[in-house]
Image (cartoon, rainbow, N blue to C red):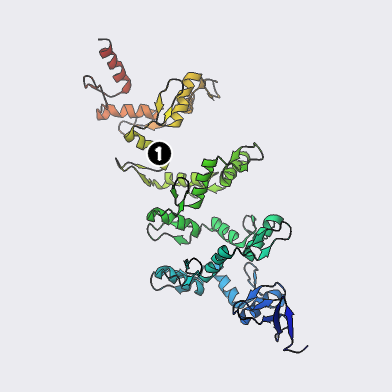
Amino acid sequence: MEENETYLVSGSYVKKSCSDEILQIQTDMEEKNFICDICEEEFSEISHLKKHFLCHKKQNLYSCNICSEEFSQRSHLNSHYRAHTNEKPYSYDVCHKQISQKGNLKVHGLAHAEEKPFSCDVCHKEFSDKSCLNEHYQTHTNEKCSSYDVGHKEFSQKISLNKHYQTRTHEKPYSCHICHKQFSEKRNLNRHYRIHTKEKPFSCDVCWKEFSRRSHLICHYRIHTNEKPYSCEMFHKEFSQKTYLNEHYRTLTNEKRYSCDICHKEFSQKGSLNRHYRIHTHEKPFSCDVCHKQFSERGSLNRHYRTHTKEKPFSCDVCHKKFSRKCNLIYHFRIHTNEKPYSCDVCHKDFSLKSTLISHYRIHTNEKPYSCDVCCKNFSLKSTLNQHYQTHTNEKPYSCDVCCKNFSLKSTLNQHYQTHTNEKPFSCDVCCKKFSRKSNLSQHYQTHTSE
């Protein structure tokens, strides 16, 4: 076969190259004229095609001696090694941030310059990376070049097609060598590894808080910038994260797409279903590295950490009192606003907390769901049951740091403190007489009402 022999392929004239595996399409367009006849991937330069073709030839692969992953080029293997060594030989001269790949150094520079050299000629939207522009173009052309041969679903990117294949086949080719959990994508495995290594490579340059994922850092940064890029078209409410917008939409539609196959409880979010499953499995995958206590939810672990660090990041902007949990700040704020959003439908008494309303409701129903397993006495409140337990154990865990007297209840200790401080915080609004205990004030009120 002669080297310059020409063929007609799909309506275009193609010329045989020096390699039997390369077809060069002769068209007026410069981009992606070189096609691999094995996987039909297209390239704009012949050198890129030649490099790509090495991935089809097993004898030319370079293998990592740590994780055994194979690469068609030695330079790719060298770059890969840095994932194991955490080596970052490239430093940006403005912020001195260290980067493992030379190509990423150039992309990072665009973030400082806020330069977006690639512009869409349809809507004029600008991008800092050419690959992002190419993906964006497909939203205008509705181009879906890859097709799924069973469901005939189409995708604009080949990588999306490959991911979709794995959802149908349930293929999970990547496995964690520590806990053996399997993943369908390598990037998910890499993120998972950080659970074991505790690595948090992404840091906020405002408050220096560290994150294991870049996406978490981006979402966190909006706390400082107050940026809310996602908006509800119906109520014009804005959100900092797309997930919050989706949750908001589901509250409007009351949509619950996810159902527990054990108890059939329905949920509007998949994450809520996954957390719910742990009630059935008793799984507690999140562990405190200080006291090793385990939790079923990451949020519970984060809140627990604050008991060790004494961190109280939520502050009241009225009295400046600080709290370790946001919900406690919300409850506290109702002291200032005198807001009582929960009302009893029997006696119409209002409450600031829903839990207080539930406890109050048991006065009407006479419900006592908490039972002592020693004497079988029933109680309407769990806190009352816990106090009752101490009558059996004779436990007095609360101690006065002035006279060292011990008490079984914290409230009793607080009352006792007032004997040392002579504090009388309860005042009669009729005669202004003060009392150290609320019960004494209540008794005193009767002297006015009896008159």
Residue lying farthest to the right in this orientation:
1
> Residue 420 sits in which quadrant?
top left
Q: Is residue 232 left or right of residue 24?
A: left
Residue 432 position, x and y percent, is 21, 22
The residue lying at 27 percent from left, 16 percent from top is 444
Residue 379 position, x and y percent, is 50, 22
Q: Tag 1: Cα neighbours inside 10 Å, few (<14), some, or many (≥20)?
A: few
Residue 68 position, x and y percent, is 65, 68
**In-front residue for pair 156/258:** 156
Q: Is residue 226 visible to the viewer in this orientation of the structure?
A: yes
**In-front residue for pair 160/407:** 160
The residue lying at 51 percent from left, 57 percent from top is 198
- Above or below residue 318? Residue 189 is below
Amino acid type of the residue that numbered disc 1 sits on in the rendered structure: Asn
Q: Is residue 264 left or right of residue 353?
A: right
Q: Is residue 389 left or right of residue 435?
A: right
- Residue highlighted by disc 1: 328
